[in-house]
């Protein structure tokens, strides 16, 4: 009798624990669905992160305008809106968006710079895809390298894996307009030792490029983890100096395909087929805590 009683009691205890766990999870999920997201340090939303240093922001909430300055595009090619990480997102089908000068980005001494965005793209097996560039105007730009280039090596094989190779470059200019540049990538050398693999094709990935003028380092983060190559971090040119005026370009390389007549379109370059959400540019090198907060809040739609 006692054995049967003990088994019944054990079953009731187990059922109670399962029920409590299910209720707790349901409450947790309900809270997050309602947007009641717990703060991270002093931050309560993604817009709180380095707020005083954000110099440009594209929400793509059914508009292609830059949010802070309300600057509208000068040209839009093959663009639409899809469901994004945080509301609607931009989708390009072999397209791009060109902009005139955006006040917050048109700064001669940019110093340190960070670019944060969500991307959803597939490998195409032949050409690289640019997400964002800050470039001299069409009368000055003679090559694809710009003040900022944020892109992916989508020319990797499409049949073998889901690996997304992220690549970013920055450049500084002297008084004569000559560019000195540096880049980093999550590729080359010993995998998971020199760099981190990103299994990120056909899904949303939070991509952050950070240039620290004080340290002369360039890094790439994916989903708040530093993935860039340890051997390519250090450069030697300090603060970024831009040959103003400069202008933003989304989804294309600054070449003849996007209206830059002095810069020839190279065979490894393509217009973007993919999606972008919550594109932000900062005039500082974001720290790990700030990058994590952006990832956390935006992933939860906050």
Image (spheres, rainbow, N blue to C red):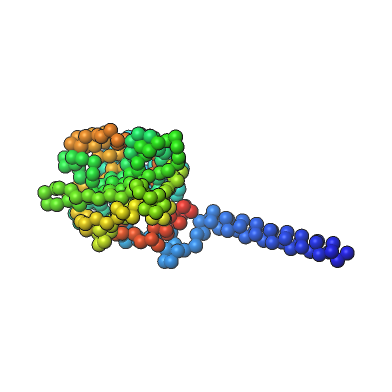
Q: Looking at this view, is 138 or 47 the one in front?
A: 138
Q: In this view, does 61 lie above or below 261?
A: below
Q: Is residue 3 left or right of residue 120?
A: right
Q: Where is residue 214 in the image (x, y as percent from the top left)?
A: 25, 62
Is 191 located above or below residue 125 in the figure? below
* Total numbered labels placed on residues in the image: 0
Q: Where is residue 88 in the image (x, y as percent from the top left)?
A: 43, 44
Residue 80 appears in the picture as rendered: no
- Image check: 220 left or right of 172? right
Q: Residue 3 lies in what quarter of the image? A: bottom right
Q: Which of 36 and 229 is in front in this view?
A: 229
x, y percent for residue 4: 84, 62
Q: At x 20% / y 37%, what residue is drawn? A: 263
Judged from this view, the residue extending furthest toward the front is 190
Tell me where residue 108 sits by quadrant.
Answer: bottom left
Q: Which of 26 and 164 is in front in this view?
A: 164
Quadrant (top left/top right/bottom left/bottom right) for the N terminus: bottom right
Report x, y in % for residue 115.
Answer: 33, 52
For the residue pair 32 and 66, the one nearer the viewer reads as 32
Which residue is the extreme one toward the right? 1
């Amino acid at each position: 009798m006692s054995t049967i009683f003990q088994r019944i009691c054990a079953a009731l205890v187990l059922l109670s624990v399962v029920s409590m766990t299910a209720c707790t999870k349901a409450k947790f999920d309900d809270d997050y669905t309602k947007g009641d997201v717990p703060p991270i340090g002093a931050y309560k939303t993604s817009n709180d992160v380095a707020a005083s240093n954000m110099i440009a922001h594209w929400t793509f909430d059914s508009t292609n305008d830059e949010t802070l300055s309300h600057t509208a595009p000068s040209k839009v090619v093959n663009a639409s809106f899809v469901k994004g990480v945080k509301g609607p997102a931009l989708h390009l089908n072999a397209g791009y968006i060109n902009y005139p000068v955006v006040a917050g980005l048109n700064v001669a001494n940019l110093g340190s710079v960070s670019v944060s965005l969500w991307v959803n793209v597939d490998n195409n097996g032949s050409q690289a895809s640019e997400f964002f560039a800050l470039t001299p105007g069409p009368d000055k730009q003679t090559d694809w390298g710009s003040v900022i280039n944020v892109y992916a090596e989508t020319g990797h094989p499409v049949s073998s894996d889901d690996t997304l190779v992220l690549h970013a470059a920055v450049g500084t200019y002297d008084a004569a307009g000559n560019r000195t540049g540096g880049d980093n990538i999550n590729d080359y050398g010993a995998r998971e030792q020199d760099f981190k693999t990103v299994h990120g094709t056909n899904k949303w990935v939070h991509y952050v490029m950070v240039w620290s003028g004080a340290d002369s380092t360039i890094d790439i983060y994916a989903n708040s983890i530093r993935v860039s190559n340890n051997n390519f971090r250090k450069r030697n040119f300090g603060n970024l100096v831009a040959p103003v005026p400069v202008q933003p370009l989304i989804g294309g390389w600054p070449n003849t395909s996007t209206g830059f007549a002095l810069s020839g379109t190279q065979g490894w370059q393509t217009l973007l087929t993919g999606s972008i959400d919550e594109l932000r540019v900062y005039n500082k090198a974001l720290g790990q805590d700030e990058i994590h907060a952006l990832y956390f809040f935006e992933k939860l739609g906050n």
